[in-house]
Structure formats: structure tokens, C-alpha cells
Image: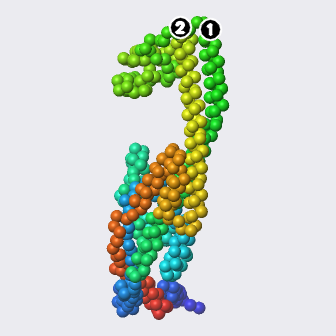
Amino acid sequence: MKSPENNGSDTQDTRRNIHEKGHIHENETNPIDLDFFKILWKHKWFIFFASVLPALVVGLVLFLGPKNYKITYTYNMTFGEKAFKVLEDTFYSAENLGELVEKLRENGLDRYAQRLAGTEIAGDLKQFVSFEVSPPYFEEFSKVKNLEELQKLQAAKGSLLIMRVGAKSGENIQKIASVYRKNFEQIIPLYSVKEELNTDIENLKEEMAIIEETRYTLDLQLEGEKSTLEKLKNAGSVSSDKPPSDIILQLNIEPLEAEDLDKLLRFQRAGSKSAYLFPKAKNLDELQRFQNIGDNSAYLPLSYQVQAEETRIINLEEQIKANKKMYSYYVDLLSLNEKLLGYVKKAMPSYCTLEQFHLFLSNTLEEYKNQQEISDYLKAYIKRTENKIATAIPLVEGPRVYPVAKGTVRKTATVFMIALIISIFVAFLQEGRRRS
């Protein structure tokens, strides 16, 4: 039988064994005594070479590898925000990119054309060709503090358009840039011409519809005024004497604000036709008294009522006559615009240029030499087309080709830092495995 002393000794031994076993267990689960500096120093050469070699390889590849090149064309064109976005959407459209790919292949640039054809993201397309306006205004929206500043910024327009063309070959970039340049200067403007013609045709049809809508109303109103005039003449004897020369009737006029009186008086002194819509008003009170007559022509003497009706009839007849003439003009104009649009739609798939469209306009002008109004319209349209051709010429015909900075130092430093972190992690991992 064990004595109490032995019992106590055994208990102490048991506790000591448990404590030692606990230490052994801790050593088994945490095998690395994290003495960081010793580990780093022990694996210093591994960390050094594992960090420096990848960075050195990347730096040499970037330095000795083929350079990227860019060429920049600057155009004296004014673009607002909406117009600039329309330009980008048009240039990067699938239809236009297909034309560019085909032209690049025709010029023996198959590999470049294949890369362009395989790019679908708009952001990636800008590595081939990109546009920007100068001075820039899109980046300034974040700085706007109030609505007034926002409206001013939205109305702002860049006065220069910059097109940058990029390539990986200094030998081919001139050929590549010429394809992009011709497309931008000669093909892209036809897209805007097509859109403008569509808009003009819609507006002409709308104007013609308005004239057709009001035709019956005006005829009915004219018939009513003639009937009123006949009844007024039959209502009593109308004096053949003319009204005093310093009074000219004009009914159903809109009230004028006080600040318009000065303008009216200036028109009268200048002899403007607008002055004859009113009596020779000398001040605001006289003008207001005249306006207060309003539609109450029935309270005027009979001779004035007859004169008022005759004036209304003359105005209606002139308006009907003008509407007929304008409608006829719109018909001819609509036919011309549809003809121009038909040519553009037919010619665009065959890479029709703005110069060819200008030649077509000049030939078309000969067909309308006997129609003065249409001929004048077409001459003005030709002038606008010539302006488009003139602005689609870069300010410098032969811009310099320059190599693009690859960011060798920045990229090499980035690779070095990543490799350093990975090598340190591997060093600790190896030390942990060895100790375990």
C-alpha cells in the first residue's frame, strides 16, 4: 500500500508528465517557431533569385520585344457630346468594321485584319483606333456643382477631333493608318448624310401633312368670310369713301407686352411692313386702345366692317395660294431627297466615298436647271457637302509615327513585387514542412 508521501510524489510526477506531453502536443501542431529573420536569412538566395529572375526576364522581353507604334491625325471639327457618341457608335458598328477588315485584307494586312475581326469589346477596339475631342469635356461631369454648370458643360463642344491609330509594326502602320483615315474621311460622313436625308424626308412629309390637314379648314373659313362680306354689303349702303389714311385695321391680333412697343415704333420709323399691322401708335396707351377693339368689329362703322372682312378674305386667299405653292415645292423636294437617299443606300455597300457623292450631286444639278427653287436648294446642299469634305482633312497631312511607351519599369517592378511575395511564402512553407 502506497504511503501518502508516495501518493503526492506520484501526483506531481503525473502532472509533470501531462505538462511535458502538452508541450509535445503544442510542438506537433505548431512545428514552426516563427523566427522570421532567421528564416528569411536562411532562404535569402532562394528569395533573391526567385524575385529577381522573373522581373529580369519580363524587363528584357519588354525592352527587346517589338514596339507598339501610333500615329495621330488632328481634324478641325466641332463635336458636342451627342455627336461624338454617334461618331463612335457609327465607326465601331459591325457594318463599318466589316468594311475595314475587308480593306485591310486587300492591302495585304491579313494578320492585323484577323485581330481586328476577332475583337468584339468596344474598349478593346480602341487599341486599334481611338477618337477624342480637344479640349476634353466628358471627364468634367464629376466636378459639376449645380444645374447651371451642368447645362453649360453639356452645351460645350470640342473644337478639335483627334484620331489615333495603333499598330505593332512600324513598317505597316502607314498602310494601316491610310485605311482608317480613308474610312473616317470618306465613308463615315455618308452615314451622317444618310441619317440627315432620312430626317429631312420625315420633316417634309410632316409639313405636307399639315398643309393637307388645314386645306379644308381654310377653304371653309374663306367661304364663310365671303358670305359674311356679302351680307355686310347687303345690310346697308356702304360709303365709297375710304377710311382715313392714318388708320389701318388689323383685328384678332395678339396683345403686346410693354417692352415690345419700342420695337414696334422702331419698325414704324424704319418703314417696316410690320408697322402697318397697327395704327401709327405713338405710345403704349394708344396701342392698347387699338388692341382693345379685339373681335368687336361689329361695333365699328359699316365701312370699317367691310374693310375688315375684305382684309380677312385677302389674307386667307394669300395663305391658301402660298400653301398650294409650298405643297408643290415640298413634293419636288421630297422627290429629290428620296433620289439622293436611294443613291446613298445603293452606293454604300460598294464603298462609295463622299467625293463620289459630291460628283453625283453635281450631275443631278443639271437635271433641275429649269426648276429654280429645287436648283437653289441643290446648290446649297452641294456647298454643305463641300464643307464636309473640307473639314475631313487633317491639319497636318503627314504626322509623325512615334513608339508607344510600354511602361517597362513599372511592369518590371510589379512583377518583382509579386515574385518577392510568392518566394517568401514558399520559403516559409518549405521551412514549415521541414520542421514538421
Amino acid type, label 2: Ser
Instruction: Locate the N terminus and report the quarter of the image it occupies.
Output: bottom right
Query: What residue sits 50% from the left and 45% below the top?
Result: 372
Label 2: element kind: loop
Q: Is disc 2 in contact with disc 1, using a CB cutoff of under 8 Å?
A: no
Q: Tell me the crowding category of disc 1: few under 14, some 14 to 19, or many 20 or more residues within 10 angstroms, Cα based.
A: few
Q: Which mark is residue 126?
A: none
Label 1: element kind: helix
Query: What residue sits 42% from the left and 27% below the top?
Result: 273
Q: Please tell me whether residue 231 is drawn above or below residue 328 in the rendered image.
A: above
Q: Please tell me whether residue 368 is drawn above or below residue 228 in the rendered image.
A: below
- Can the viewer see residue 420? no
Which quadrant would residue 214 be assigned to in this image?
top right
Q: Which mark is residue 235?
A: 1
Residue 415 drawn at (x, y percent)? 40, 81
Residue 201 drawn at (x, y percent)? 58, 49
Residue 91 drawn at (x, y percent)? 50, 65
Q: Measure the alpha-carbon separation of dots 2 and 1.
A: 12 Å
The residue that label 2 is drawn on is 239
- Can the viewer see residue 242? yes
How is this picture coloured? rainbow
Residue 368 drawn at (x, y percent)? 53, 50
Q: Tell me the crowding category of disc 2: few under 14, some 14 to 19, or many 20 or more residues within 10 angstroms, Cα based.
A: few
Q: Please tell me whether residue 260 is drawn above or below residue 145 in the rendered image.
A: above
Amino acid type, label 1: Ala
Q: Count the marks: how many? A: 2
| In the image: residue 257, left or right of residue 119 | left
Query: What residue sits 39% from the left and 51% below the top?
Result: 156
Query: What residue sits 49% from the left and 9% below the top?
Result: 241
